[in-house]
Image: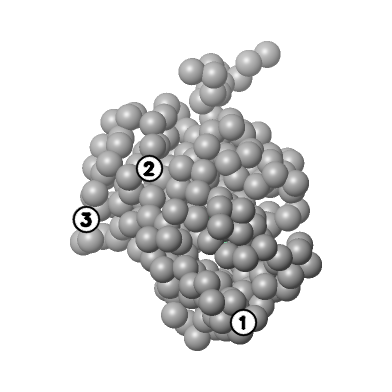
């Protein structure tokens, strides 16, 4: 028997918000330009490579998710000299160590509204998880230094990096996280910042809110459930780029908005 609140709309069941899966890079914090990019360049320099990724170049490379995959892509397009897989792995390990050190310096704060929404959802008993292409130890550093160690226990799953064979835009990391939590796509919302992330969430059957940044603002988010400049805070207005469900009172994004999206 179908419960009264469970009706089918555009292939998604209308349901209560029971789980939020968070992307990391670009969503929890703006880690790419001043975190990952700098760490890659430090690793290249340390290993004796002349290659440096400037801000626009890194923007092009972001279409490839995963750091090792990004280096391989740059090699294949002629940006760097060829190297065996073991050397790419070594470079990436160096990069991860530099990234952890940058994060430990407290250089990368959370984006506006992230802590407010995390705390509201946690207090409401909504399951929280992470679904990211980032290396687990890089994620751990961000949780410890930017979010707070108590969040290691507050997130019910930390799905990261090579735990699945195919990275975003494949749906695998979202599917894996939902399986770990015993959650269904109808009761789960994804929070993302990039087209690759949005495609991944969409392919896993999830509703998705996108908070853009300078690297992703011009990307195609057609079909996403809400696209905003940031989650925002009281007294700090956001820019609404797409609001297909017509959510009201969007001065900043609240848990009530996220809950309302599950009813659309
Ligand atoms: C963003 C990414 C990551 C990071 C680097 O992932 O593409 O690859 O740039 O991570 P998401 P690693 O937005 O899904 O978090 O170097 O650790 O792979
Ligand atoms: Mg991201």
Does the residue at mark 3 contact the one at mark 1 (Cβ under 8 Å)? no
Q: Nearer the viewer, residue 33 or 107?
A: 33
* Numbered-mark total: 3
Q: Which mark is residue 237?
A: 3
Secondary structure category for the residue under label 2: loop
Question: What residue would you read off at disc 2?
Answer: 219
Q: Point out residue 103 in the picture as x, y percentages from the top left corner.
A: 53, 78
Does the residue at mark 2 contact the one at mark 1 (Cβ under 8 Å)? no
- The type of colouring in the image is one colour
- Name the residue: 25% across, 53% down: 238
Q: Point out residue 141 in the picture as x, y percentages from the top left corner.
A: 60, 75
Q: Point out residue 251 in the picture as x, y percentages from the top left corner.
A: 23, 50
Q: Residue 133: in sight, yes or no?
A: no
Q: Point out residue 64 in the picture as x, y percentages from the top left corner.
A: 56, 50
Q: Residue 198: in sight, yes or no?
A: yes
Q: Sort mark 1 into few (<14), some (14-19) or many (20+) by Cα contacts within 10 Å.
A: few
**Which of the two labelled residues, at mark 2 and mark 3, occupies the earlier sequence position?**
2
Question: What residue would you read off at disc 1?
Answer: 48
Q: Nearer the viewer, residue 125 or 36?
A: 36
- Name the residue: 30% across, 37% down: 242
**Above or below for 90 versus 232:** below
**Above or below for 98 versus 62:** below
Image quarter (top left, top right, bottom left or bottom right) of the C terminus: top left
Secondary structure category for the residue under label 1: loop
The verdict on label 3 being within 8 Å of ligand 2 is: no
């Amino acid at each position: 028997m179908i419960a009264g609140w469970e009706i089918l709309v555009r292939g998604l069941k209308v349901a209560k918000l029971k789980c939020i899966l968070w992307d990391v890079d670009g969503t929890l914090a703006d880690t790419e330009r001043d975190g990952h990019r700098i760490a890659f360049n430090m690793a290249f320099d340390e290993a004796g490579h002349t290659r440096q990724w400037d801000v626009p170049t890194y923007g092009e490379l972001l279409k490839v998710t995963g750091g090792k995959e990004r280096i391989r892509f740059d090699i294949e397009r002629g940006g760097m000299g060829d190297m065996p897989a073991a050397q790419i792995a070594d470079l990436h390990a160096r990069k991860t160590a530099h990234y952890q050190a940058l994060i430990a310096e407290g250089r990368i704060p959370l984006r506006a509204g992230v802590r407010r929404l995390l705390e509201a959802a946690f207090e409401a008993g909504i399951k929280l998880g992470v679904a990211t292409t980032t290396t687990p130890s890089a994620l751990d550093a961000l949780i410890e230094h930017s979010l707070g160690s108590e969040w290691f226990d507050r997130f019910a799953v930390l799905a990261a990096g090579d735990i699945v064979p195919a990275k975003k835009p494949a749906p695998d990391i979202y599917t894996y996280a939902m399986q770990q939590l015993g959650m269904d796509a109808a009761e789960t919302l994804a929070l993302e910042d990039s087209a690759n992330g949005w495609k991944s969430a969409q392919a896993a059957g999830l509703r998705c809110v996108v908070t853009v940044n300078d690297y992703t603002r011009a990307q195609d988010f057609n079909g996403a459930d809400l696209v905003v400049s940031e989650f925002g805070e009281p007294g700090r207005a956001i820019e609404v780029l797409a609001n297909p469900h017509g959510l009201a009172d969007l001065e900043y994004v609240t848990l009530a908005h996220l809950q309302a999206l599950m009813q659309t």
